[in-house]
Image: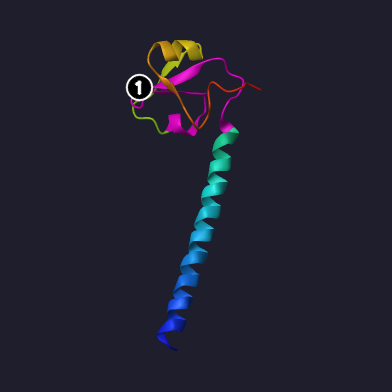
Amino acid sequence: MSGHVLKGIGVAVIVLLLAVAYNMYSSSVENDFKDISRTEAYRMGDHFTGFYHRPGCPKLQQAHGGGIRFESNEAARAEGYSPCKRCDPDGPNE
């Protein structure tokens, strides 16, 4: 086999591995949102990152040192916390 053929096979293998990895990542992100509560009124603040989240947000579960409970979005913002971009605590509730 020539070097060009082996290089082409190597590139094809890398592309296939990247496609499989992306598929696995996409599935895990979809599963992350199954446990996020869209009906709870309270929010959880992560004092390490400065963001507040909906209960069950996967980003809060990765938080260092626990969280602070807020009774509303306004209370979290008053303490200087910003909304999480992943669970969108300021977005509509179900």
Q: Which residues are magenta?
A: 35-61
The residue at 62%/22% (across/down) is 92
Q: Identify the residue at the far right of this view.
A: 94
Q: Is residue 58 magenta?
A: yes
Which colour scheme appears in the figure? Answer: rainbow
Q: Is residue 67 above or below residue 30?
A: above
Q: Quadrant where the C terminus lies?
A: top right
Q: Which residue is mark 1?
A: 47
Q: Identify the residue at the far front of this view.
A: 4
The residue at 54%/20% (across/down) is 90
Q: Amino acid at mark 1?
A: His
The residue at 56%/15% (across/down) is 41
Give the percent coordinates (x, y) of residue 74. Answer: 48, 11
Q: Decide if residue 83 is on the left or right side of residue 27.
A: left
Give the percent coordinates (x, y) of residue 52. Answer: 44, 22
Q: Is residue 20 above or below residue 79?
A: below
Q: Quadrant where the N terminus lies?
A: bottom left
Regarding mark 1 in the picture, which secondary structure is present there?
loop
Q: Residue 33, located in which quarter of the rendered image? A: top right
Number of other residues with Cα within 10 Å of mark 1, as a class: few under 14, some 14 to 19, many 20 or more: some
Q: Nearer the viewer, residue 1 or 53?
A: 1
